[in-house]
Image (cartoon, rainbow, N blue to C red):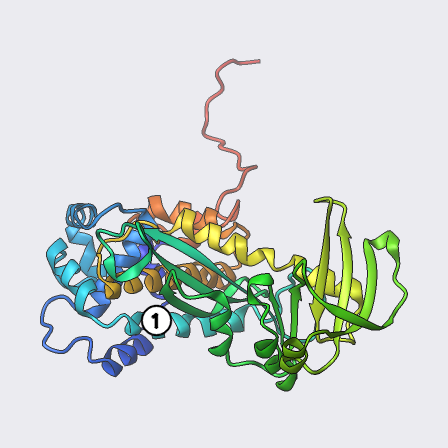
Amino acid sequence: MNAGRTVFSQLIDFLPKKQFDNCVRRYRGNRRIKTFSCFDQYLCMAFAQITYRQSLRDIETCLRAIQTKLYHCGIRGNVCRTTLAKANENRNWRIYADFAHILINKARTLYAGEDFGVQLNREAYALDSTTIDLCLSLFPWAKFREHKAAVKLHTLMDLKGSIPTFIRITGGKVHDVNILDELVLESGAIYIMDRGYLDFARLFTFTQNLSTFITRAKSNFDYRRLCYRRVDKTMGLRCDQTIRLNGFYPSQAYPAALRRIGYFDVETNMKFVFLTNNFALPALTIARLYKCRWRIEIFFKWIKQYLRIKTFFGTSENAVKTQIWIAISVYVLVAIVKKELKIELSLSEILQILSIVLFEKVHIAQVLTKNVWQNENAQFHNQLLLFNL
């Protein structure tokens, strides 16, 4: 039964408020703040993400239209676009980055047993980046090319539940391979990445940390074959070889043996050549794991389509990072709600529904669960017949 609370208020219940306050205290976010706290800022920006607001004026107009409901939703301060702009400009973006990681840890626990298509008893991650284009005249600090600005969103995603576990926001000039230096590798985990991360010196650190990497070979890849294993070509496999690198510098960078697997995908009519340091998993499993890497491409497409990370409410670096981190936290929050309420809808469907019922006084499970609160076979015995037979 509905207790008279809005959907937005019920959604906030899934946020660990005490841990948010710890993040704020860590960076002294509420220092000398009297009327518009960091939590007010977070809720306003989360509202903008969920309801697809276009600008600060848009946020101010919509929230002032429902001023009487804001207090019970957790927004205690007066919403003003100038106040919100100053908050995004000055309050440390790390507050929201740390809070997003708290939500990420909670979501990973909920999705720990999720099936992503390959049965494994170890963690599997996909690593990639996406570029967000910006206007150079408005974002000069993010200069990418002569007449273009951009930021990159480097992401390591847990394939169980498609939850991002590591995110770095950098300028567009930062090459993807540099992010390998920042990863804290888990022993026994599997890391799947494309050819942009092919740096043998850095990949050798995966072997030294007893981690598995799976990537693709470049067309000019120089190697010598040591031995091979028979493969079932009816399954798309073409070869399974143990190799070593040729050349002085490559062999010095990666002195150990590598595994080279050839695979033909009948769906795309393309041939792939994979490189890995794992000699235990079947060759077909390696190919299937790499195919799961496309989940991170879907993740990037999802957040760009359903969240506000292409149009920004502020032009400073702090404002941009604040908005992106709050968008990531909203994505993870929706994933948590989906799991805890056992909702069968997709994340995009959930977000679309929330965008139109956010301030309705109805139970959140009622609007997000299919055919739970309605009895399709209900008979209305007091309904008169149009015709008497």
For image coordinates 34% across by 43% down, the residue present is 356
Judged left or right of residue 282, residue 65 is left
Amino acid type of the residue that numbered disc 1 sits on in the rendered structure? Ala
Judged left or right of residue 340, residue 282 is right
Q: Is residue 188 above or below residue 199?
A: below
Residue closest to the eye, 138 or 376: 138
For image coordinates 42% across by 62% down, the residue present is 153
Residue closest to the eye, 291 or 179: 179
Location of the C terminus by quadrant is: top right
Q: How far across and how far down the image is residue 280, in percent?
A: 78, 76
Residue closest to the eye, 161 or 209: 209
Residue closest to the eye, 335 or 172: 172
Residue 115, by quadrant, is: bottom right
Judged left or right of residue 352, residue 277 is right
| Visible residue check, residue 378 | yes
For image coordinates 30% across by 64% down, the residue present is 321
Label 1: which residue? Answer: 97
- Which structural element holds mark 1? helix
Query: Which residue appears farthest toward the front when viewing the image?
Result: 248
| Visible residue check, residue 5 | no
For image coordinates 17% across by 75% down, the residue present is 30
Q: How far across and how far down the image is residue 198, in percent?
A: 59, 68
